[in-house]
Image (cartoon, rainbow, N blue to C red):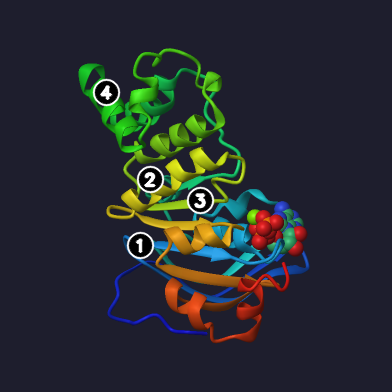
Amino acid sequence: MVAVASAVKHAVRAEDVNLYYGTKQALKGINFAAPARQVTAMIGPSGCGKSSFLRCLNRMNDRIPGAKVTGKFDVAGMDPYAKNADLMRLRRAVGMLFQKPNPFPSSVFENIALAPSLHYGIKGSTLEGMVEETLKRAALWDEVKDHLRRSALELSGGQQQRLCLARMLAVEPEILLMDEPCSALDPISTGKIEDLISELSKDYTVLIVTHNLQQAHRVSSQLAFFMLGELVEMGDTEAVFESAQSEVTRDYLNGRFG
Ligand SMILES: Nc1ncnc2c1ncn2[C@@H]1O[C@H](COP(=O)(O)OP(=O)(O)OP(=O)(O)O)[C@@H](O)[C@H]1O
Ligand SMILES: [Mg+2]
């Protein structure tokens, strides 16, 4: 594996991570590090463990009966698996965006306002200002400013995905996990999300799983290639695309399998 320079500040570190679903081992000895305020793309054939690995970082595998995780983690300065781990704090610091947008079945406004009003007690004009600011950061404000009280489910898929992104930003996370966030979107909506990812990486650490190699190339500065539950190679995106160390990585990038 290609090591990442140790002087870099990492927002995510994982050492010797193993994940089992019952007796089946889905992740094998993963050593992974994602630099802070950069975009790290995760690629690899279907079933290689990309989603499983993302879920390890905010303990979403807890919800899967029989799932067992071992290894050392540092995620936004926290150990998600520590005995006294604060799961609320972890899930606020580590947001997640899925393949299929999943807005709450309530208004556009409530989708953004719910968590800040519940967790931080923000109300009234402060809350309104915060909703506006957050929707602007997700490049959605102009499209929804006249329909804030309409159901989020009336938005297009691309708009719903940006709304989910805004909802995630509203709790001031540090790390944004995205699992194939554009796979259900048309090219224009995909372009908008990609532009947003680049913009957001000035302030947030982004980990994105994608099957689209061009997308990985466009948006990321670090690239991690997974195969059969192993992290085969990780390094500078440009360098991996130009001259991957491992032959399997080269074959995958050249479309020879997967
Ligand atoms: N809830 C689960 N229970 C049991 N096995 C699972 C579960 N989720 C995933 N797996 C298995 O773990 C392995 C890795 O799956 P995972 O979904 O992490 O792959 P992936 O790289 O995200 O694939 P894709 O690109 O298709 O999304 C696969 O063999 C899969 O069958
Ligand atoms: Mg997946």
Q: Where is residue 186 drawn, in percent x and y?
A: 57, 39
Q: Which residue is mark 4?
A: 127
> Which of pointers 4 and 1 lies earlier in the amino acid sequence?
1
> Which of pointers 2 and 4 lies earlier in the amino acid sequence?
4
Q: Which residue is mark 3?
A: 178
| Figure quadrant of residue 29 | bottom right
Q: Marks 3/1: CA distance?
A: 13 Å
Q: Marks 4/1: CA distance?
A: 29 Å
Q: Which residue is mark 1?
A: 38
Marks 4 & 3, CB-CB < 8 Å contact: no
Tag 1, which secondary structure?
Answer: loop
Q: Tell us which disc is closer to us: 2 or 1.
A: 2
Nearest the eye: 208 or 189: 189
Marks 2 & 4, CB-CB < 8 Å contact: no
Q: Tell us which disc is closer to us: 4 or 3.
A: 3
Tag 3, which secondary structure?
Answer: strand
Query: Which amino acid is tagged 4?
Result: Leu
Q: Tell us which disc is closer to us: 3 or 2.
A: 2
Q: Marks 2/1: CA distance?
A: 13 Å
Q: Which residue is mark 2?
A: 196
